[in-house]
Amino acid sequence: MRNQYYPNLANPITINGVTFKNRIFGAPMSNPELDPDCHMRKEDLAFHENRARGGLATVAIGLGIVDPVGRVHTKEVTLYDVMSLPSLKEYANAMHRHNCIAVMELAHGGKYAGARSHDGAGDPLVLGPNNETNPDGLRVTSMTDEDIERVADCYADAAVLCQKAGIDMVLVHGGHGWLLGQFMSPTMNHRTDKWGGSLENRMRFPLLVIEKIRKACKNNMLIEYRMSGSEIIEGGYGIEEGIKMAEILDGKADIIHVSAGVHEDPDAFVVTHPSMFIEHGCNVHLAAEIKKHVKTPVATVGGLNDPDMMEQIIASGQADIVEIARQSICDPYFPEKAFSGRKDDITKCCRCFTCFYNYLTNRTFCCALNPVVGNELENKSGFPASEPKKVMVVGGGVGGMEAAITAAKRGHTVTLFEKNDRLGGQLLSEQYIPFKQDMYNFAKVLERRLKETNAEIRLNTEITAEDVAKLKADVVMVAIGATPVIPPIEGIDSPKVAGLLTLHSKEPQVGQKVVILGGGLVGSEAAIYLDGLGKDVTVVEMKDDWAADAYFMHKNAMNIYIRNSRIKIYTDTMAKAVTKEGLTCETKDGELLLEADTILLAAGMKTDQEFVNSFYNTADRVFMIGDCVKPGRVLEAVTLGYNRAIDV
Ligand SMILES: Cc1cc2nc3c(=O)[nH]c(=O)nc-3n(C[C@H](O)[C@H](O)[C@H](O)COP(=O)(O)O)c2cc1C
């Protein structure tokens, strides 16, 4: 029977005898941490199992490394180590518990490897297409025929290990600049032998790998081949050659998975992992072009978070399969919600890079909008509270709403007080900002979820600590947010000066020349928004760097926008006074006048500590949540709201 909401997206597909229950696949994601032997831990398995639980047809573990020489870092599962088998088996079993196809990515870092791949003394052995020095300064040795044969055998051995574990499909990583991608690339492969030069020669190694896997697994292992449809780097191949590569893979791989870009290039990085400044589905056109030329099912990936768009991709024949990575973190129940007519309850990934940043730096699973991520093992939100309590939540921003929803779902009697006439707090300011729509959507999703609980919501209700105390709650959660910092400079009360609240309206009341006072993340994003509206925007930041508080991938994405825009940023610049003409500032080189019709304040937020403190002792247990603890990100507000509610 066809699904009534998404008949094409929910339509199963059978490939080489294996049926995938729908067209939404879980794109490969590695693990931020592994055990000391680089095997998956219980936490890793729980994270991936949660991805499977919500209805994905497949879940892929990223970066299974097939050869010790191919290691890039220590977050790669060691497929050359037979002791990986128990955790791989656990993984396959976990997937099968949810009728989900278990997929393992087979990868080799090639010239970018070098971690833990010591060939005895001296430099680690690093193998690649050419003799060269890699960006880490390591000597790369051009692979001999024997090396190529040996590494191809490593892929085959790894596939056999996966087969033993019960894994259903291997995903051979031939994109993003990994070893096979290096051989495919005209700019990375300078060989003149049978492994380089012509397209046929550059494809020889990937084909050898596929052939060896097929043979070693006795034709009983599905192979998905991940390639970049275009490398998007100078000298790299574009879609014309991408099509020819796919034609060569046609009939050899079971699925041609079309991604984009090369991981070493910052500009390409935000296309491989599309940033919020790039349109959703920005890589679909690559898959669509390739699909016109091959019979093998084609998958597309990158910035997909909307089931309507996905349905359209499948229905229009642009791709046979859509893959999601970040969206499967943000809302693992995405497929289930879409297929049961609950698309309005989907938390859409806002592409903020919280997940990726925390993978790399804190080595944790993390999502700004999904507080369960990283806590899958101890997630108790589904469990009823042992003793229902009377809970008051003060403040209806995302932290307060998350706390109220979780507490109500656990059976507590919840009342939420919000002084404004709308729920959503700070996120309401994102309503008209095109690249923040998914963030704004999150506030609306939480509002809807809250209304579905039996929590009582009291809008337009400013409540004091005395009022709260009189209500005799068991637990009080204070999520009253923070207020903007108003810098003490001359003329700050001028009518030219406006707060970021001005951006809350569809047509913000700002003049043509706007100076933004404060070049942190918030000010920089406001600059991008106003530039998009055609304003002349200048940002003034007293630190020596702008958006210093942004995750570096997000900053990279902003930088790409800003460097192609008319936005001017002055760092090391101190605002002095608001004048008739604009803003006078002090720089290292002396005084500067920035002409402005409007000066927008983005100088940070502050907590009204006295007011916050007044709520202590209004009940036996009082919890503070979000910006009123310390002005921060959505991540902290949502995480704290959720966790405090499961503490009750
Ligand atoms: C946290 C994280 C880890 C990732 N790890 C891998 C990986 O191990 N191997 C891989 O091929 N791609 C990896 N990717 C890239 C994704 O598979 C995907 O191509 C990319 O994120 C774009 O899809 P999305 O917009 O749905 O996130 C990772 C992405 C993220 C966000």
Image (cartoon, grey):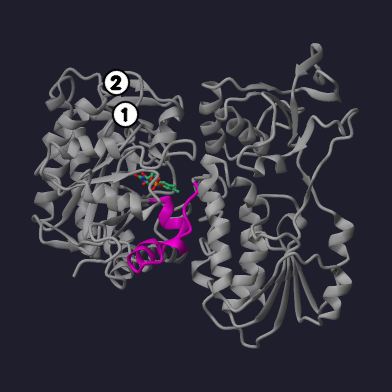
**Front one among 264 and 83:** 264
Q: Is residue 333 magenta?
A: yes
Is residue 520 toward the left or the right of residue 589 in the image? left
Which residue in the protein does label 2 denote?
187
Q: Quadrant of the N terminus?
A: bottom left
Which structural element holds mark 2? loop
Residue 332 percent across, percent down from the top left: 42, 62
Residue 312 percent across, percent down from the top left: 28, 49
Q: Quadrant of residue 173?
A: top left
Q: Are marks 1 and 2 in contact (CB under 8 Å)?
A: yes
Residue 149 percent across, percent down from the top left: 16, 37
Q: Quadrant of the C terminus?
A: bottom right
Residue 231's disc number: 1
Residue 428 percent across, percent down from the top left: 63, 51
On screen, residue 103 above or below 115? below
- What segment is highlighted magenta in the picture? 325-350
Residue drawn at (32%, 45%), measured in percent from left and top?
Answer: 301
Q: Quadrant of residue 384?
A: bottom right
Of circles 1 and 2, which is in front?
1
Give how far apart the Cα atoms at labels 1 and 2 are: 10 Å
Q: Quadrant of residue 463?
A: bottom right
Residue drawn at (61%, 65%), measured in percent from left and top?
Answer: 402
Kind of residue indicated by mark 2: Thr
On screen, residue 221 above or below 121? below
